[in-house]
Every structure is written in C-alpha cells, then in structure tokens.
Amino acid sequence: MSRNGQSARFEGKVAMVTGAGSGMGAAVARQLAAEGAKVVVLADVNGESAAAVAKDVAVGRAVSLDVAHAAAVDAAVEDVLQEFGRLDVLVHAAGVDDPEVKQWIADALAAGRPPEVTDRLADPAWRRVMTINLDGTFHVLRAAVRAMRPAGAGAIVVIGSSSAFDTPVGYPHYAASKAGVHALSQAVAKEVVASGIRVNVVAPGPTETGMAARTPAALRTGFADPRVRPYATPEEIADIALFLASDAAANLIGAVLLANGGRFTA
C-alpha cells in the first residue's frame, strides 16, 4: 500500500508529467503521488499553474516547460536525472487546441451551413498546433528515451486524441497533429521495446478540461449524445494512463486505447 492507503503501483518511482498544470496532466500527477511515487515532476508551460497543482502533491516538483522547445525539454529531463538518478515513468499530456477555429465551426453550425476552415486557415495557426502537439511529442519522447535506455527500463504514456480517428469536420490541423502523435508513438514503441521501454497512447474523446471549457456551446451540445457516456473526467483518463504506465500493462506495446465513451469504435 502507498502512504495514503491506496494501491502502490508506483512505489518509489521517479515520474514526470507534462501538461501537469491542469486537466488530465494534473489528475495524472496527483494519482501518481497517491500511488506511492517517490517524486513527481510537474511540467507545464504555465509554471504558476504547475506550482499550484504541486501544492496538492506531497512529492511534487513544479517546472516551467514549453515542450515546443527541444533544448528546454532536454534540460528538464536532464535535471531529473541529475537530482534523482533515473526517470521511471513519463506521461506526456501537454497539447493545445485552436479556440478560434472552434468558434468558426460553432458559427457555421448556428447558421446552418457547413464549416469553411481549410481555405481560411493561416500558416501560423497550422504551425502552432503542429509545433506544440507533434513536435512537442517528439521532443518529449526523444528526451525520455535518452534517459530510460541506459537503465533498460521505463514506461511512457502519451495523451493522443480520438480526433485522430474521426477527423472532425473543420479541424484538420488538430486531427493531423494527433494522428501524427499516434503514429510517432507507435513507431518509437516498436523500436524501444528492445531496450525495456514501453510506449503507449491514450486517445480520449470529450473530456472536462480547460480546453473543453473553451469549446463553444454549440459544439458541446453536439457531443451531448444520450446514447453514450457524457464528457469524461480528467481522473477517468488518468486512470487509463496510469494503467498503461503500470506493470499490469506489461504486454501492451504501442497500444492506442480509445477512451471516448462509446462515441465510435476504431
């Protein structure tokens, strides 16, 4: 058992969570600590948010980190190795959406017309989503593998998205970024399993996070289908992520677990 009486799947582990300042990342960090982790490094582009969550995590250490900057990611992981000697678990939850495009889609729905996004989508909007979501995932995976390969062990879990499968109308850059995240993670998983490292992906559907809170009402209504489960909680997605990071998932390599409440299957 862990220090608070919960299961101790991560007893003594050194863990790092990106995007830990809110939502799924924060839920993962809290649960890692509750299940016995020796230390949980909470990394987020908003250092103040990470620090606020770390106050609730007895073994938490907050770090300001923009995953789009490769050198910063390398330095953050190296700091973990220097202080604690190893990195056992990394959960990568950092990512962004595009609130402006979501509003375009909502406006189109309200007007009863199809969304018109691709021909309006500017290069900076495309690059922002791809740089943070896809390039950022590469930076984090690369740094984690560099840290874990010498030890011959480690578990990496990446938060993807069900949007990679259903490719929502009017959201091409986000869908493309997450599809790339899935393929990247699976390719890395097949490579590094020989070094004792497991890489897997959770692909959530609608989840109650800060990102979801910025979703226009018209789009949220579209997800309110009584035939399926409502929006997931961050804790529900964290449970899946931590299962993948645990020894119970030892035979899962390169899995993409679709966690969308039954909206569709893949």
Image: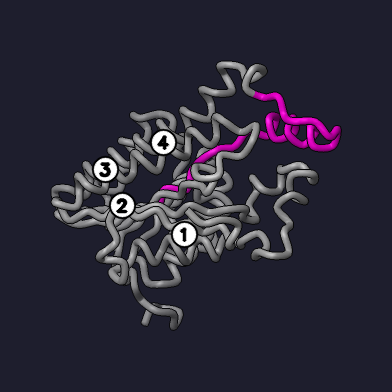
Q: Which residue is mark 2?
A: 254
Q: Which disc, if any, is residue 188?
A: 3
Between discs 4 and 2, the one toward the N terminus: 4
Q: Which residue is mark 4?
A: 180
The span picked out in magenta is 91-117
Mark 4 and mark 3: Cα distance apart in space:
12 Å
Q: Which residue is mark 1?
A: 29
Q: Which disc, if any, is residue 55?
A: none
Is there a contact, CB below 8 Å, between mark 1 and mark 2? no
Residue 98 on the magenta segment: yes
Is there a contact, CB below 8 Å, between mark 2 and mark 3? no
Between discs 1 and 2, the one toward the N terminus: 1
Measuring from the top left, give residue 123's x and y in whole percent.
56, 16
Q: Amino acid at mark 2?
A: Gly
Which sits in the foreground, 226 or 106? 226
Quadrant position of residue 173 = top right
Q: Judge whether 78 appears above or below 200 on screen.
A: above
Mark 1 and mark 4: Cα distance apart in space:
25 Å
Please tell me which residue is depicted at 30% across the width and 48% down the height of the picture. Answer: 80
Q: Judge whether 134 appears above or below 41 on screen.
A: above
Mark 2, Cα crowd under 10 Å, few <14 / some 14-19 / many 20+, is many
Measuring from the top left, give residue 95's x and y in whole percent.
51, 40
Is there a contact, CB below 8 Å, between mark 4 and mark 3? no
Between discs 4 and 3, the one toward the N terminus: 4
Q: Amino acid at mark 4?
A: Gly
Which sits in the foreground, 191 or 263? 263
Is residue 34 at least partly visible in the picture?
Answer: yes
